[in-house]
Image (cartoon, helix red, strand yellow):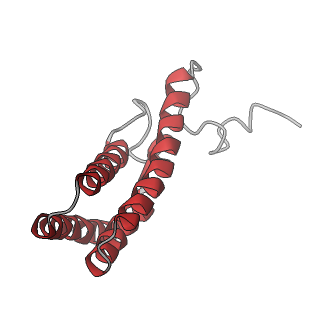
Amino acid sequence: MIDVVEFFGLFALVALVLRMAIDACEWYTWLLLVIVVIEFGFIRYCATVRWHKNGGPYEGISLQFKKSRAPTAYILFLGCLFFQLIPSTFVLVIMAALFAIIGHVNVILIYLLKKDTQDLPVNYFSNNKGSSSTSL
């Protein structure tokens, strides 16, 4: 379902670019659009990369990045739709701010992953793999 919403979001983004070209928008509107596209691309990139060598496709931070695809797709689709109805830079500012929050969380997760030096398997504590070795 998310792939469908994301497809419609990308289609709406193309329609938004065409509308901006026809309306001859200001440079700052184009700059905001470029920022939105870069942030969306970064969030999408994080969701497609396999971050853990020994883990499955959606384990560890990859699962968190997969879960961030849903709000990202809806923000893209609804933001582009609102811009078609109300062509205002305020809509792009809201989209950029929401994408910045999601992108910021992604950067923090990647930083913590790269900083981690332990050799424990992915999801060691969350899948109760370590519970048999510790006694209470």
Would residue 58 appear left or right of 10 to someone viewing this image? right
Q: Could you tell me residue 97's position as x and y percent?
A: 46, 54
Q: Could you tell me residue 135's position as x and y percent?
A: 85, 34
Q: Is residue 87 above or below residue 108?
A: below
Task: Give the total number of marks visible in the rendering.
Answer: 0
Quarter of the image that includes the N terminus: bottom left
Quarter of the image that includes the C terminus: top right
For the point 24% across and 72% down, the residue is: 8
Q: Could you tell me residue 40's position as x and y percent?
A: 33, 52
Would residue 122 appear left or right of 99 to someone viewing this image? right
Q: Is residue 111 above or below residue 96?
A: above
Would residue 89 appear left or right of 118 to someone viewing this image? left
For the point 80% across and 32% down, the residue is: 134
Q: Could you tell me residue 20's position as x and y percent?
A: 17, 65
Quarter holding residue 127: top right
Q: Nearer the viewer, residue 97 or 106?
A: 97
Q: Is residue 107 above or below residue 33?
A: above
- Furthest toward the bottom, the residue is 85
For the point 69% across and 35% down, the residue is: 130
For the point 33% across and 39% down, the residue is: 49
- Furthest toward the right, the residue is 136
